[in-house]
Image: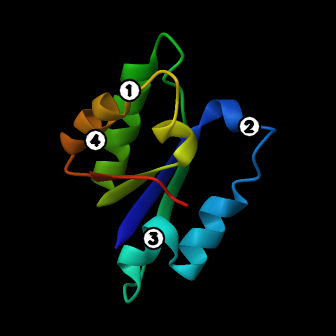
């Protein structure tokens, strides 16, 4: 299964993202749903919901991921707990490209 992970751009320089990768590699936490599946991480991108072009940029990312057959997008905890609270909007954008959104990585 092809998956992607999206994290908040504001964690750059603060978070190592090791928690996301550890959970993915060990099929733990929110990646436990893939215990017996072969996964291909196709993309690890930062969300820019805080910018003025955020919707346009996310639509572009969703389109590209959809073209490559990505089936699920995991949103990092940093996005799920973001003060902007646009998780539902993100889900709708990716749903249009047949990508299921999972809230959380670890």
Local SS, label 4? helix
Q: Which residue is mark 4?
A: 94
* Residue positioned most to the bottom: 36
The quadrant where residue 63 appears = top left
Q: Residue at x 50, y 55 (%)?
A: 43
- CA separation in Å, label 4 and label 2: 23 Å
Identify the mark at residue 31; answer none if there is no mark.
3
Q: Residue 11, percent across and down?
A: 70, 37
Q: Earlier in the sequence, mark 3 or mark 4?
A: 3
- CA separation in Å, label 1 and label 3: 22 Å
Left or right of 20 on screen, residue 32: left
Determine contact: label 4, label 2, CB under 8 Å.
no
Local SS, label 2? loop
Res 87 seen here: yes
Identify the mark at residue 12; answer none if there is no mark.
2
Q: Is residue 14 above or below residue 27?
A: above
Local SS, label 3? helix
Within 10 Å of disc 1 (Cα), the crowding (few <14, some 14-19, many 20+) is few
- CA separation in Å, label 2 and label 3: 22 Å
The N terminus is located in which quarter? bottom left
Q: Which residue is mark 1?
A: 86
The mark closer to the camera, 3 or 4, is: 3
Within 10 Å of disc 2 (Cα), the crowding (few <14, some 14-19, many 20+) is few
The quadrant where residue 17 appears = bottom right
Q: Earlier in the sequence, mark 1 or mark 4?
A: 1
The mark closer to the camera, 2 or 3, is: 3
């Amino acid at each position: 299964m092809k998956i992607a992970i999206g994290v908040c751009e504001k964690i750059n320089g603060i978070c190592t993202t090791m928690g996301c990768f550890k959970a993915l590699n060990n099929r733990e936490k929110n990646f436990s749903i893939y215990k017996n599946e072969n996964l291909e991480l196709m993309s690890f991108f930062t969300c820019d919901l805080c910018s003025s072009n955020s919707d346009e940029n996310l639509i572009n990312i969703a389109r590209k991921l959809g073209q490559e057959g990505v089936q699920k997008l995991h949103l990092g905890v940093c996005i799920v707990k973001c003060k902007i609270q646009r998780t539902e909007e993100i889900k709708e954008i990716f749903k249009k490209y047949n990508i299921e959104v999972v809230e959380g990585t670890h």
